[in-house]
Amino acid sequence: MPRFRVVITDSGKKDLEGIQANLRAKLLQKLKILETSPLPTIKSIKKMKISRKIPLFRLRFGQYRIIYHVRDNVVYILVVVHGKEFDSASKDVIR
């Protein structure tokens, strides 16, 4: 049974719309892992050191990176980007 609720923000939805349908379905399936364990307990999840105000995490899925924030029992998906766009996207998130 899920302990956390995953919410995709408007910017996250916009990012997902730009991804091919078959890959988007796989990414959405991967997000289900965050319902039980959104904190760094597996190798593909890391805490981002770039933010000091709010704790941000990064989930790696193939060539894509998902930036999210956990508050209470809710996981907020902020950004879904290709790995080569990760650095600029992560800087945009902390502004």
Image: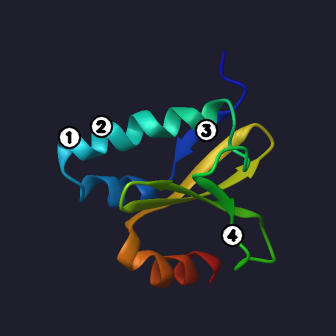
Q: Which numbered disc, 3 or 4, marks the residue that appears first in the sequence?
A: 3
Circle 4: element type:
loop
Residue type, label 4: Met
Quadrant showing the C terminus: bottom right
Q: Is residue 80 above or below residue 4?
A: below
Q: CA distance from mark 4 to mark 1?
A: 28 Å
Q: What residue is pinned by disc 4? A: 48
**Residue at image location 29% in from the left, 45% down from the top:** 24
Q: Is residue 24 above or below residue 89?
A: above
Q: Nearer the viewer, residue 14 or 81?
A: 81
Q: What residue is pinned by disc 1? A: 22
**Residue at image location 45% in from the left, 38% down from the top:** 30
Give the farthest residue toward the front.
43
Circle 2: element type:
helix
Q: What residue is pinned by disc 2? A: 25
Q: Is residue 6 left or right of residue 18?
A: right
Q: What residue is pinned by disc 3? A: 34
Residue 33 visible: yes
Residue type, label 2: Ala
Is disc 4 surrounded by few (<14), some (14 to 19) or many (20+) residues within 10 Å? Answer: some
Q: Which numbered disc, 4 or 1, marks the residue that appears first in the sequence?
A: 1
